[in-house]
Image (cartoon, rainbow, N blue to C red):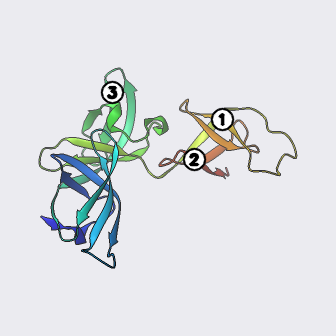
Amino acid sequence: MASTADFRNGMVIEFSNDLYTIVSFQHVKPGKGPAFVRTKLRNIKTGRVIDNTFSSGTKVNIARVERRPYKYLYKDDMGYYFMHNETYEQIRVEEHVIDYPEFLLDGIDVEVVVHADTENILSVELPQFVVMEITYSEPGLRGDTATNTLKPAKIKTGSTIMVPLFVNTGDKIRIDTHDRTYMERVKG
């Protein structure tokens, strides 16, 4: 058991007979009335984000979770396959458990979040930034740099993201996997 004073971003709690990750929280002490904690919670199974307010000092159960290092191997009709970096044990994971599966490349390191008591896989988290090669992009107009204009570009995994006009086919770019945005062009 923990109280609202122990809340941290990324903590997994048991709430309404389900597991939720704390996305964000804010302690509020109004001028009149008791203090409370305003939170955004993401359901681990569905991915849905809800808002909830806890009275200050409320007790909650913290779920024991482990983050294990895995490497992505391949995908087939049954799901996605990963290999543990130390034990070489292979596991199969369904697509709905993976955060942003469109950024998975062969050999990429991920963290598999496992419920320690039941050994159920809760989620597969990619690194915050990945480097991808642009496989197709329309050429940008020369000299059109007056505004922050973006164009669609197809990356190696087949997904499409928006990039600046100066990015061309064959360039490598860094992508933020949390919000699917272009960060910068990578040299070499």
* Secondary structure beneath label 1: strand
Amino acid type at image mark 1: Ala
Amino acid type at image mark 2: Thr
Vertical placement of residue 118 versus 183, above or below: above
Residue marked by disc 2:
181
Q: 158 or 105, which lies in front? A: 158
* Sequence-first tag of 3 and 2: 3
Q: Where is residue 43 in the image (x, y as percent from the top left)?
A: 28, 45
Q: Where is residue 187 in the image (x, y as percent from the top left)?
A: 67, 52
Neighbours of disc 3 within 10 Å: few (<14), some (14-19), many (20+): few
Neighbours of disc 2 within 10 Å: few (<14), some (14-19), many (20+): some
Instruction: Choose top left, top right, bottom left or bottom right for residue 70.
Output: top left
Residue 153 disc label? 1
Amino acid type at image mark 3: Gly
Residue 16 disc label? none
* Secondary structure beneath label 2: strand
Marks 2 and 3: in contact by CB < 8 Å?
no
